[in-house]
Image: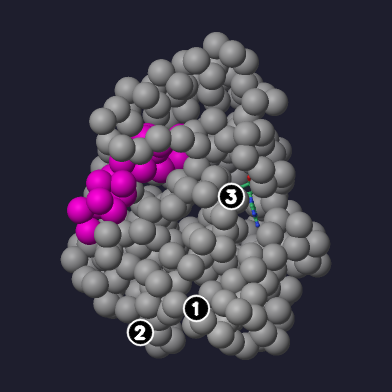
Amino acid sequence: YGYQMCLYQNFWCPKFSLEPVIALQRDFQACDTDIFVINMPKTGTTWFKSLLFSLFNRSNEGLLNTQLQTHNPHELILSLEITIYAKDKNPDLTKMPSPRLFSTHLPYDSLPESVKNSKCKIIYITRNPFDTFVSSWHYYSKLENVDNNVGCSSTMEEYFNKFCKGRSLYGPFFDHLMGYWKESLERPKKVLFLKYEDLKEDGVLQMKKVAEFVGFPFSIEEEKQGVVEDLIKLCSIESLKEMEVNKKGKCDPDFENKCFFRKGVVGDAANYLTPPMVERLTKIMEEKLNGSGLSF
Ligand code: A3P
């Protein structure tokens, strides 16, 4: 699937993340004030990281603008398994300012116990499986020439077959989202469940929800001044794409920052998937989400 994967604790872990995942599961200690951005790859990680970072730094416009213009969002909120534990198997995270913001793609069942049991908060983002698949396909097919075992020259049909069988990074896709969906219903103060499509449709409403959830709501004054709207504009794909750091920089030797910004729209899958493909994935989706109250 672009990367070599191994089945670990019932999810498809990229091989290069396995050791960091084991280290963080063993050692990471969550604080009650921590906030986690969790999702499947290609469902809006980059976008939501920029939004959450901006939410917390909104009172210092100068600093916020400088940070966004000099860092790709993945450098502003670090991934536990892709960055932090990949660089250092025993990182000292105790000196990070509070609230500490982290991201991870781990499924709920594989989170460290302290993340599940402390009062830290989780914001889970998901996206309809059709667009998620198409976005992944574009992203991973760019890896073909990368000389470190992550390249893979599958056709879209082959990728699709794997996706439908649950073989996607950190997948199966539906197991991943159902794990967090259930928690969000049982513990709404612990897990906030968001959809990419809702963020696109009404970012202001969704970000107000997020701000309340993390205990840093917008004041009436801020709302009057249009702070929420400004934040949405600042983090729009048009705005982020134009920043030099995202045009030219790299936050990983394999990836240019620009890979994280493609179209950023809802419904692009219709331009790529054939009617039988849509039918097949719709059927799987209906089976997996049946009775859950969740739909796309
Ligand atoms: P598309 O490939 O459909 O365009 P991730 O960040 O999880 O890797 O997801 C990448 C997807 O989010 C890509 O989707 C990308 O274009 C989109 N994206 C990136 N920044 C965005 C933004 N600011 N607003 C909306 N979508 C964004």
Decide whether residue 204 is among the magenta residues.
no
Q: Are marks 2 and 3 in contact (CB under 8 Å)?
A: no
At label 3, which amino acid type do we have? Glu
Q: CA distance from mark 1 to mark 2?
A: 28 Å
Residue name at image x 67 percent, y 85 percent: 61
Residue hosting label 1: 218
At label 1, which amino acid type do we have? Phe
Decide whether residue 181 is among the magenta residues.
yes
Is label 3 in a helix, a strand or a loop? helix
At label 2, which amino acid type do we have? Thr
Q: Are marks 1 and 2 in contact (CB under 8 Å)?
A: no
For residue 179, above or below residue 38: above
Residue hosting label 2: 94
State which tag comes first along the sequence, 3 or 1.
3
**Drawn side of residue 23 relative to residue 234, left or right:** left
Residue 274 seen in the figure: yes
Residue 277 location (% of width, % of height):
54, 16
Is label 1 in a helix, a strand or a loop? loop
Q: CA distance from mark 2 to mark 3?
A: 38 Å
Q: CA distance from mark 3 to mark 1?
A: 20 Å
Residue hosting label 3: 201
